[in-house]
Amino acid sequence: MAKVETALTKMLNIDYPVIMAPMFLVSNARMVIEACNAGIAGAIPALNYRTDAEFRKALDEIKAATDKAYGINLITNKSNMRLEEQLKTCVEYRVPFIITSLGSPQGVINVCKPLGIKVFADVIDLEYAKKVEAMGCDAIIAVNKEAGGHAGRISPRDLITTLVQHCKIPVISAGGVGNGKQMKQMLDYGACGISIGSPFIASTEAPVTEDYKMACVNYGAKDIVMTTKLSGTPCSVINTDYVKKIGTQQNFVEKFLNSNKKIKKWTKMITYYKGMKALEKAAFGATYQTMWCAGPSIEYVHSIRPVKQIANELTSEFENSLN
């Protein structure tokens, strides 16, 4: 029986209306299992696995350890050349829910909905939310301007209230939540759940370097900046000395290449690929090129702890805020 009942807890049969957000390079099977054991849902980007065999091994690990709801994040634009293979594997394993990002969810919906697999789509505004609702999404993930990684442009309150007012499907808030009081605030705005990522980067189970984890401990909300250098799309990172050195805006040549109609598709793919490789290098190895994705909610990260402890503290604070 769910301890806090919302549309999200009912859909996923979880105790608390929380998804541990899928984080590029960070999320892994161990983290998802521990999240599930804490009464919330966990999710992983399929792109965190280089091969289908590695992806399947992770899904086997999760299924062997828990029967709770977990999700997979699929990048659905042309930069993800493995989408078809990843979706096929998700279907074969009957993954409970899929989160689509950076592209149309239509193909994923067409395949998954007849099988009972829930599909949630990342959106940053009402226009796109209405499109994915019409496609048949089960819920929309409202990515606001305080999200880690690829963030939106609108404040949590304005985005949630607008989507709730104009859409008929449930709204899950993503961005800017680092404690239980803020979780309740998102529900008060009308969200049915919260997707929380950055606080879980500084977890003992996360596979990234201690430097990355300690950056989440030592830096705060004021140290988060938006950069277009990683993927061409605004992305929130910690303002390290290296980020300060290279700047956060694309230079003249980069802007020109991204605006040229004939080559911008290929330029964006190359920019995205190079940016993701830079993040990977910084996340797993010692390098002066420290580009670490995170959101303002690292303000509430004060130590490196197990996933289950982080989740338990969040949900305990949330329960206390309801009284």
Image: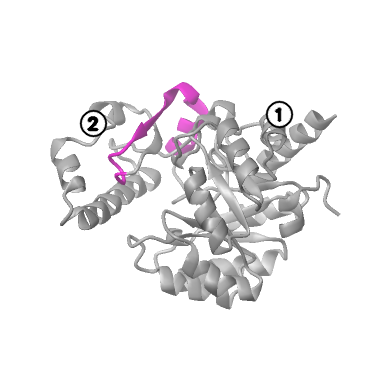
Q: Secondary structure at mark 1?
A: helix
Name the residue rendered at 77%, 56% in the picture.
10
Q: Secondary structure at mark 2?
A: helix
Q: Note whether residue 306 is visible.
A: no
Above or below — where is 100 with respect to 82? above
Q: Note whether residue 66 is visible.
A: yes
Residue bearing mark 1: 181
- Give percent across and percent down for residue 318: 75, 34
Above or below — where is 100 with respect to 250? below
| Membership of 308 in magenta stretch | no
Q: Is residue 29 left or right of residue 74?
A: right
Residue bearing mark 2: 246
Q: Residue furthest top?
A: 222
- Give percent across and percent down for residue 227: 33, 35
Q: Residue furthest bottom?
A: 92
- In the rendered structure, which segment of residues is drawn in magenta? 210-232
Q: Amino acid at mark 1?
A: Lys
- Give percent across and percent down for residue 42: 62, 53
Above or below — where is 121 with respect to 178? below
Name the residue rendered at 59%, 27% in the picture.
300
Q: Amino acid at mark 2?
A: Ile
- Give percent across and percent down for residue 309: 69, 40
Q: Quadrant of the C terminus?
A: top right
